[in-house]
Amino acid sequence: MGNTSLIQWTNATWNVARGCNKVDEDCKFCYMYRDSLKYGYDAKQVIRTKTVFNLPLKLKEPSLIFTSSLTDFFHPAIDSYRNEAWDIIRRCPQHTFQILTKRPERINQHLPEDWGDGWDNVWIGTSVGSSYGIHRIHDLLKVKTKIRFISFEPLWERIDLKSFNIDLNQIHWAIIGGESGNKTGKYRYRPCEIEWFEKLIADLSPTTQIFIKQLGTHLAKEMKLSDRHGGDISEFPKELQIRQMPLAYKPEEIGIGVAV
């Protein structure tokens, strides 16, 4: 975690805590749990960070900041100090904070008092990798925010969005990515198909901006791609070479986003 990131849709990651608890099958092979084995911490124990808690205050250049890649910003264990994190965000209007949660049902009860219709520098999103997570979209739609997004990653099942009662016009941005992982061991990858990407793109509203992050390890192996996670956009099928950012965002200011 720090002021650089290998995640294609952000500039930096900021973790107010480390550790989380799985909510459903979408979390089965969570990369944070996998990484915890490498770095020697208890993935199930949510611990407040120390040296990086104030990171946004130290970043000089305006940045897109993925807000908590190693935990869930709306995890109950963070309730006691979340307002401190909100205050840091309030003090950094030059940055844009991308908050992605699997607990959108808790968002409205844990927003700052001056939230109103949302802060200009905060995007709120939820993760949905299968039909298990569809209920999270309904919860997200209850939240007032300037930018509302969904991360369809890890995409491990075909999702037919139009079979659910969802106002797709309220989704401003969609990230789509296959699962990365190992062929054997505890943290593997599940299959993903090109048609699943195409189905989501077809179902999403024309006003939703789309960012294809990676094809995932299964397709990378199947297609013999050089990037083991299938994250090199030049290796994608032409129709999937899409990396758009929300319309309210100006990519020239930070340098992310290729609208194809």
Image: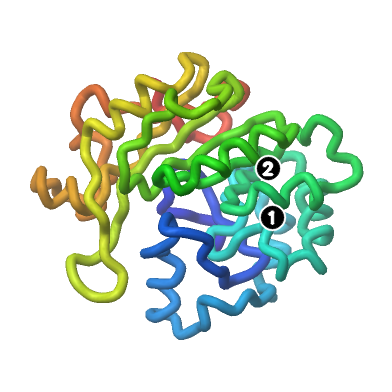
Q: Quadrant of residue 130?
A: top left
Q: Position of residue 116 (x, y in %)?
A: 86, 33
Q: Nearer the viewer, residue 256 or 189?
A: 189
103 relative to 78 in the view: left or right: left
**Residue under the point 57% across and 38% down:** 137
- The numbered mark at residue 95 is 2
Residue 125 in percent (x, y) is at 59, 41
Query: For mark 1, does the 10 Å Cα neighbourhood hold few (<14), some (14 to 19), or many (20 or more) residues?
Result: many
Distance of mark 1 from mark 2, alpha carbons? 8 Å
What residue is rendered at 77% in x and 58% in y?
Answer: 85
Count of marks, rendered view: 2
**Image position of 162 with respect to 48: above or below:** above
Front residue (pair 6, 104): 104
* Residue 66 visible in the current orientation: yes
Determine if residue 8 is in view.
no
Give the farthest residue toward the top.
206
- Tell me if residue 113 comes above or below residue 235 in the rendering: below
Q: What element carries label 1?
A: helix
Give the amino acid at mark 1: Pro
**Where's residue 126, x and y in %?**
56, 44
Residue 238 image position (x, y, % from top left): 21, 24
Mark drawn on residue 260: none
Identity, as a three-letter code, of the amino acid under mark 2? His
| First of labels 1, 2 by sequence position | 1
Which quarter of the figure has residue 211?
top left
Name the residue at 54% across, 65% down: 70
- Left or right, 8 with respect to 251, comes to left
Colour setting: rainbow
Q: Are marks 1 and 2 in contact (CB under 8 Å)?
A: yes
Residue 56 image label: 1
